[in-house]
Amino acid sequence: MTTQSILVVDDEQGVREAIVRVLSRAGFNVSSAEHAQAALERLRSGEQFNAILTDLEMPGIKGIDFLRMVRERDLDVPVIILTGNPTLESAMSAVQYGGFRYLAKPFNNDQIVEIVRSAAGMHRLAVLKRRALELCEAGAWLIGDAAGLDAHFDRALGELWIAFQPIIRWPNQVVFGYEALVRSTEPTLNNPGLLFEAAERLGRVQELGRAIRGAVSNCIPSAPTESTIFVNLHSADLGDDELFAAGSPLSKHAERVVLEVTERASLHRITNLRGRIENLRRLGFQIAVDDLGAGYAGLSSFSQLEPDIAKLDMSLIRGINASTRKASLVRSMISVCREELGTSVVCEGVETKEERDTLESLGADLLQGYLFGRPERQFRRASIFAPAN
């Protein structure tokens, strides 16, 4: 078996040397650093370890902060927290951020050897598990603990960009608007589903919503003058006071913006939802219900939102040309929305000319999908009505 490499980080020389001596005698290849910054430099240089032992209280970077920084470089290495002043709060923080063990000083030599041996074995298993997950394309959940996810989420926020997909008024063949779709160049969180799952796990959904709205507002001045911009909201955004502030970045463009609220999300926990929607309308926003037909069967959310626009879910649109049942349902939904509720309808997920032509025959006039354009950084203007099949 390959000798396991261990890093010991402690500002007390006597403690550091004692741990190195004990672990070396047990057959480990042991390195040491006198503070967190020195340890981070070793990680940044490419050194890899099977386990790290770190003191909790050190000058400069503290042990919990160090643990979080380690996760930016290595998602798997077990980190053992050592402390001469154990508290419930620090123990909980260590667990929250993925610490392998929390150990109070002084400790028994046999105990530390056993814990390090277990940590090194867990590291080998974690590496193998990661390879298995990669085969299954498990995405962001390759990031196993809060510290690692938090670090990668910060990086994703710093690398956000907005893609725009056109919404077409058919058969006039003019661009009605664009849906703004969040993206990130951070590899582990490079699609909206992973990004929002990470935000929900970390309790940072509103922070993500603000970042998205700020990024969209920066792009709006370069959009075609007459176009409407559709922006997705997470249900948690409806509880964020920043969304309702007249001076917020997106509010400055409210007359051009439709806020989409998905029917897939339950809104029953949002207090005074109707009042909040009225406040958004006073700012100039329009409201859309997204994914209509794929969310909850009841209409309580729909009735409280009283949307200006309803977006039919792509599951209703795909293959509609070959399904009389879908065609009949969509015809009826379009009729009810327009004639009885005064709500415009966008049909999402249009991929073929046959679907487009069927929707036209059913009375649909606002269409969105790959047939007309995929999400792109730039606002598509030319060649949009001559797509390949």
Image (cartoon, rainbow, N blue to C red):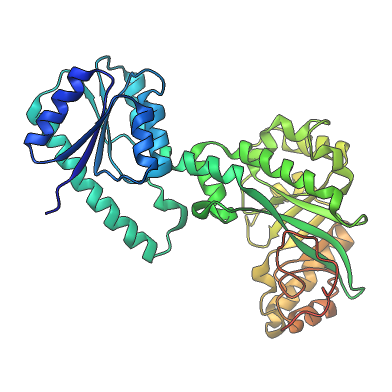
Determine whether, in the image, residue 99 is placed left or right of residue 289.
Answer: left
Q: Is residue 185 above or below residue 207?
A: below
Answer left or right for 341 relative to 351: right
Q: Which quadrant of the figure has residue 29?
A: top left
Q: With respect to residue 4, does 21 lie above or below?
A: above
Give x and y (percent) for residue 173.
89, 73
- 342 shown above or below 25: below
Residue at image location 22% in from the left, 46% down from the top: 122
Which residue occupies 65% across, 45% down? 234
| Residue displayed at 72% across by 45% down | 215
| Quadrant holding the N terminus | bottom left
Q: Is 29 rendered above or below residue 367?
A: above
How many numbered circles does the render carry?
A: 0
Asked whether residue 257 is in view, the answer is no
Which quarter shows the C terminus? bottom right
Q: Quadrant of residue 332?
A: bottom right
Q: Nearer the viewer, residue 93 or 293?
A: 93
Residue 386 in percent (x, y) is at 81, 80
Quarter-of-image position of residue 269? top right
Percent across and percent down for residue 154 are 54, 40
Residue drawn at x 41%, y 20% as measured from the top left: 60
Q: Is residue 65 visible?
A: yes
Pick the residue in front: 332 or 48. 48
